[in-house]
Amino acid sequence: MPTTSETGRKLGDRELSRVVFSADRIAERVGEMGRSITSFYRHDDDLLVLGLLKGSFIFLADLVRAIDRPLQVDFLVASSYGSGTESSGEVELLYDPEASLDGRPVLLVEDIVDSGTTVDRVVPVLEERSPASLEVCALLRKHAGATVKEPRWVGFDAPDRFLVGYGLDYSENFRHLSYIASL
Ligand code: IMP
Ligand code: MG
């Protein structure tokens, strides 16, 4: 017996309990966000869209295709600390974007902002590189805490449940689903 069914709905004893955001609903919302971002940056040059890996990879791919203006794409990977681990406040970039941020509008793309810890650690590191502006776009927002930099664009308010799919993982599984489900 394969552990994963063809639809990805089952993984071992883990079953997806319910679709929370369908592929159609996500596509519609991502289109709206793309139009809003296009309009927000209409007077800017040199837009750099920075995807925070791995979770943002599918969202980013759809989002940039919904942004109707010139832009460049790069990625960053930030070290993650286990829950309960006190950070020194410094974030280690496991992959540092090659693109220069100096004097450019930068849009940081996150899959989900939960406590805001990730955004709070990455934003100061990026701001040190003197971007002309720095905004955050998150597909999902849970409300476990406030961040120093609230996302200017949020796709959906997320329920307080563990979500998978459309880039979001549970132990690296389920990222490939075209919809978002709760476990
Ligand atoms: P934060 O640092 O607490 O804001 O959490 C953000 C990160 O935690 C995201 O980039 C995700 O990788 C992960 N995360 C938070 N909630 C979920 C979830 O419901 N499903 C999958 N990953 C999540
Ligand atoms: Mg994750």
Image: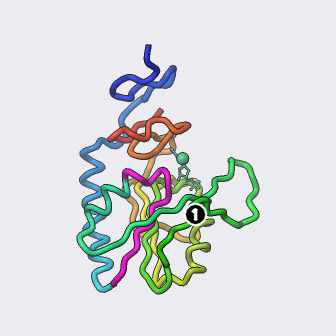
From the viewer's perspective, is 90 left or right of 135?
A: right
Quarter of the image with the N terminus in it: top left
Picture coordinates of residue 51 (x, y %)?
A: 45, 61
From the viewer's perspective, is 171 left or right of 104?
A: right
Picture coordinates of residue 91 (x, y %)?
A: 66, 64
Picture coordinates of residue 183 (x, y %)?
A: 48, 32
In this rendering, is residue 85 above or below 8?
A: below
Q: Amino acid at mark 1?
A: Ala
Decide if ligand 1 comes within 8 Å of the CB at mark 1: no
The structure residue drawn at horizontal position 31% and vertical position 71%, both measured from the top left corner, is: 37
The structure residue drawn at horizontal position 74% and vertical position 59%, both measured from the top left corner, is: 87
Colour scheme of the rendered structure:
rainbow
Is-magenta flag for residue 57?
Answer: yes
**Total label count?**
1
The structure residue drawn at horizontal position 40% and vertical position 61%, both measured from the top left corner, is: 154
Would you name the residue on which mark 1 appears?
Answer: 146
Q: Secondary structure at mark 1?
A: loop
In this rendering, is residue 85 above or below 7?
A: below
The structure residue drawn at horizontal position 36% and vertical position 71%, both measured from the top left corner, is: 72
Per the rendered image, the range of residues in magenta is: 45-58
Is-magenta flag for residue 120?
Answer: no
From the viewer's perspective, is 157 left or right of 80?
A: left
Q: For the view shown, which residue lies furthest in the front direction?
A: 98
Q: Nearer the viewer, residue 158 or 30?
A: 30
In this rendering, is residue 122 above or below 8?
A: below
Picture coordinates of residue 98 (x, y %)?
A: 50, 70
Q: Residues within 10 Å of mark 1 (few under 14, many from 20)?
A: some
Q: Quadrant of the rendered structure where residue 111 is?
A: bottom left
